[in-house]
Image (cartoon, rainbow, N blue to C red):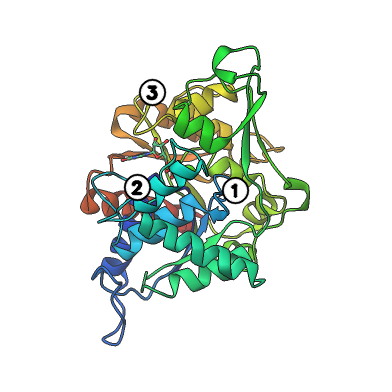
Amino acid sequence: MKVTVLAGGVGGARFVRGLREECARRWPAGPDGTPAADGTPASSADVTVVVNTGDDLWLAGVRLMPDFDSLLYALAGVNDAERGWGRAGESERVAAELREWGVGWPWFTLGDLDLGTHLARTSWLREGLTPSQVGERLQGRWQLGVRLIPATDAEVDTHVRIDPSLPEAEGRDELHFQEWWTRHRAAIPALAFEQRNLGAARPAPRVEDAIADADVVLLAPSNPVVSIGTILAIPGMREALSATAAPVVGVSPVIGGQVVRGMADACLTAIGVETDAAAVARHYGARRAADVDPAATGLLDGWLVDEADAAAVPALEAGGIAAASVPLWMRDLDTSAALAGDALDLAERLRTAR
Ligand code: GDP
Ligand code: CA
């Protein structure tokens, strides 16, 4: 079984941990399968995660890839589960020094262990490795049980357009996404999200094959605009998704009209999409809805909404997207695994219906 997932950082990591667990239960590896670094049993399923690179940036002389690292740390079991990001047992001595030197952003703490990752990455980039080759080296340190690939090797950092006349804009008309998100907590109205260098970007090597060869493609319940949206904006990505024979099934990050954690509603509002599970599905669009809409150019064959949004299912189905309502809260590993199982079940229903 080959599963390919499109994912952002923290929401993506919760979902992928659940998926890895569910795969181990459904398709256990033989006796010589190596368990993951955190003890998760091995699976014969082949899971590839295509990771958002829109949040990446250069800061204090090093390259940060926040979503990639969130997945890396969470799957290796070295993440700070309580705080929700970064490494467990982290210290911040270097960050205090950087602050004294006036280097980096004082409101964006780089932990010491985390900086070790960024230094390793930057040193390999300087040696001439591509970001996806660096990603391979980074995940070689721990047995993850899944393969992580940055969506692209190009630097497509997301910038947020803002109104320069607002006092908090300090005269600027754009901010790096990280500054808008972390420093301003998404409180400055976003006029648009723009990715740099998109024209020159392509999916990283093996990404298109991972989509073409998949038995199932899943969209994690990640931010539809700045996580999944940035992956989809890479030229070639939509074409790969529309061409694959695998069903494409997404999971709503919105439950009962609210984003589950975080501030993704500020991103949806900026692109004119209602914070609503069905509205997000319509934004992605139906992939093969020839009977309903012969010109359908969307992405989704299937969509999972929460039980609180069960009333949305019939209209979604009528619009060409197979839908089901299931518990969408990922409270712990078991609920995350159950959710991944529901996504795999919906995909299986679509595969056998063809
Ligand atoms: P980020 O890169 O760290 O912002 O994380 P992602 O983009 O991967 O995911 C952020 C999204 O995950 C948020 O918009 C939330 O709505 C969604 N999310 C977080 N926790 C849950 C959950 O338990 N269930 C569901 N369905 N969505 C969640
Ligand atoms: Ca992110």
| Secondary element at image label 3 | loop
Q: Nearer the viewer, mark 3 or mark 1?
A: 1
The residue at which mark 3 appears reads as: 257
Which mark is on residue 39? none
Mark 2 CB lies closer than 8 A to ligand 1: yes
- State whether residue 348 appears in this view: no
Circles 2, 3 touching at the beta carbon (< 8 Å): no
| Secondary element at image label 1 | helix
Work out whether 16 lies above or below 143. above
Upstream in the sequence, badge 3 or badge 1?
1
| Secondary element at image label 2 | loop
Upstream in the sequence, badge 2 or badge 3?
2
Residue at image point 64% right, 67% down: 126
- Crowd rating for badge 3 (residues with CA inside 10 Å; few <14, some 14–19, many 20+): some
Which mark is on residue 85? 2
Residue 101: % across, % down: 49, 44
Does residue 240 appear left or right of residue 304 in this picture? right
| Structural distance between the alpha carbons of marks 2 and 3 | 25 Å
The residue at which mark 1 appears reads as: 231
Does residue 11 appear left or right of residue 147 in this picture? left
Question: Which residue is nearer to you in this view: 254 or 153?
Answer: 153
Q: Quadrant of the N terminus?
A: bottom left
Residue 244: % across, % down: 62, 59
Residue at image point 27% right, 44% down: 83
